[in-house]
Image (spheres, helix red, strand yellow):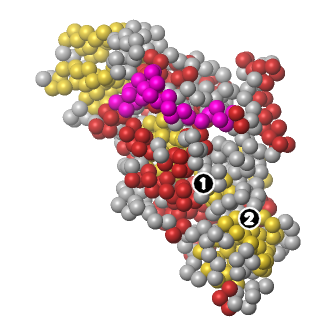
Amino acid sequence: MLGGAESLKPRAQSLVPRQLLSYPFFGALPGQCGVTFRVWAPAARELRLVLHGGPADGEHSMPCHEQGLFELTIDGIRAGQRYGYRLNGGDERPDPAGRFQPDGVHAPSEVVDSSTFEWHDASWQRPARRELVIYELHVGTFSNEGTFAGAREHLSALSRLGVTAIELMPVADFSGSRNWGYDGAALFAPSRVYGRPDDLRALVDAAHACGVAVILDVVYNHLGPEGAYVLQFNPLYLGDRHSTPWGRAVNLDGPGCEMVRSFIIDNAFHWIREYHVDGLRIDASHALIDTSPSHLLRDLAKTVRAEAGAAVLLYVEDHRNLASIVGDEGEQAWGFDGVWADDFHHVLRRLVAGDAAGYYSDYAGSTSELARTIAQGWLYSGEISPRLKRPRGTDPSAVPMDRFVVCLQNHDQIGNRAFGDRLHHVVDRATWRAVSAVLLTVPMTPLLFMGQEWAASTPFQYFTDLSPELGRLVTTGRREEFREFPAFSSSEARSAIPDPQSATTFEASRLRWTERAAPHHADVLTLYERLLALRHAHTVLGSSADVRGESFAPDERSIAIRRHDANEDFWIVACLRDRATVALAAEDDGREWTLVLSTEDAAFARDPQPPVIRFEQPTRAVIDFARPSALILQRRAY
């Protein structure tokens, strides 16, 4: 009962076709007089809205409209109202598009009014794509607090470092108290373990005040194994046409797919509209299998940019090396700003650390491979992958270099290792300095993973907090993943792999900010600050809009990169293994060589062994490297 108050009576609203509706569409949407509850539940014969507390406390029957859409507006209620839905007389379930789950993904949702937050970023302008230096972080392990507020406290440090964008690993709420974020269950709700929705807004607002953009990692290729109640509202969310490593694929091209696609696009736009994030990074787009005439992500990019503006940054993670992902024209072009290009990481890791198992078996780890990757953006452009035994990749020759996002480490490349060890844990400090210099001077867009700028001592391990029964399966599955690796061929060796379900695995992955001032850590931090300062001070050292880089391998141990325009001419030379002698020959244009930076400078190395540079003639420089290191040389006019 509603107590007879006219202002609290529910009002059914007729629905117009989806394409005529403005965003947002799904969820509990506050208005001037009350809240409109809109949920997509084609599996429901009957759907009742359950309100907890307040003047409209109780259950309310919801009218069903076209395509299984239920909608009801109740006047007189406001933000903070707890609610859920009862399908076909069964147990109450949270809203699949709920904006906040204060008591977890299995409990009632909370109405959130995004319009009440006081933003201070009206004059904010996103950095241009060429200016991006992306910093990936996991909110739960980035700070001692493990919250949005805790992350906010370190934004000024990232700005001073030279970071221009942070990439938040997924924040959609999940089952339990800790997770990487890729097991999202409540896709519209920031996880309550990180804070309230306004805490995420405050983080974004503060980032903008520091001159830092925010890119949010979102997962649409699968749902978390616990608490994803959207499947009870609509079993057609997953289809039977395709499968992925997570099971049945999200239904993007089968019966009922229209509303699945709308749900995903609505989710993407909601993060931009309600949280002012500057862009999205779509996880594992290769697992979004879509045979319809226009791929979901093409429609997503087109719709989001039409609603939010062309300046929104859109990226994907995709191992297929498809140029069409970042193409702007043609029916197959998705129009994304960039793609995570893993070949750079894989070649370098094989080169300096010797990894050869799994996908590393596709790489020789040669400097010539590295030079080719830097020159064209990725290595595989249609060649046969020995591991996959089929062609991989397409021609990248028309793709601007700034659309390739490259790294030395990220959450996958660390966390998917048995012990979560970072690259700088397995190579010496001199090598780490050298590869860092390469990363921060390539013509592609560099990505850092939290803590690498000071060679953090902490690993980043795989962690979960699922129910005991499911958790045991995850622990077993995690350890069995490594059965084929020689180091884990025995059950005893596999049992030493950290248990994802253990809280200690999560705590071991938390950054220790105090170590930034310690010897060796501080030296690496100084190097990163100097390299990024150079990158920002000299346009020619930033990400390039050209469709090709300039790099070559003098020998099997060294790499050389040239970055130049009409005004400036930089050469980055790195010995990545052992020792080497490298000769550089430049054209005779009246310029002389100047040393700008060496990773063996005393400011970066406690035991410096600087390379010896001999300028044999104005156009020729010979460099003797005593160990792995990198130089930045500039050719200046006489």
Q: Secondary structure at mark 1?
A: loop
Image quadrant where one finds the C terminus? top left
Residue at the image position 81 percent from the left and 66 percent from the top: 92
**Which residue lies under the disc numbered 2?**
108
Residue 207 position in % (x across, y down): 44, 51
Pick out the residue farthest to the left.
638
Left or right of 96, for residue 593: left
Residue 401 position in % (x across, y down): 41, 38
Image quadrant where one finds the N terminus? bottom right
Residue type, mark 2 in image: Pro
Q: Nearer the viewer, residue 406 or 630?
A: 630
The answer to if 512 sits in the magenta stretch is yes
Left or right of 436, for residue 292: right
Magenta stretch: dominant secondary structure: helix
Q: Which of label 2 and label 1 is nearer to you?
A: 1
Residue at the image position 40 percent from the left and 12 percent from the top: 607
**Which residue lies under the disc numbered 1?**
195
Residue type, mark 1 in image: Gly
Number of other residues with Cα within 10 Å of mark 2, as a class: few under 14, some 14 to 19, many 20 or more: many
Residue 559 position in % (x across, y down): 41, 20
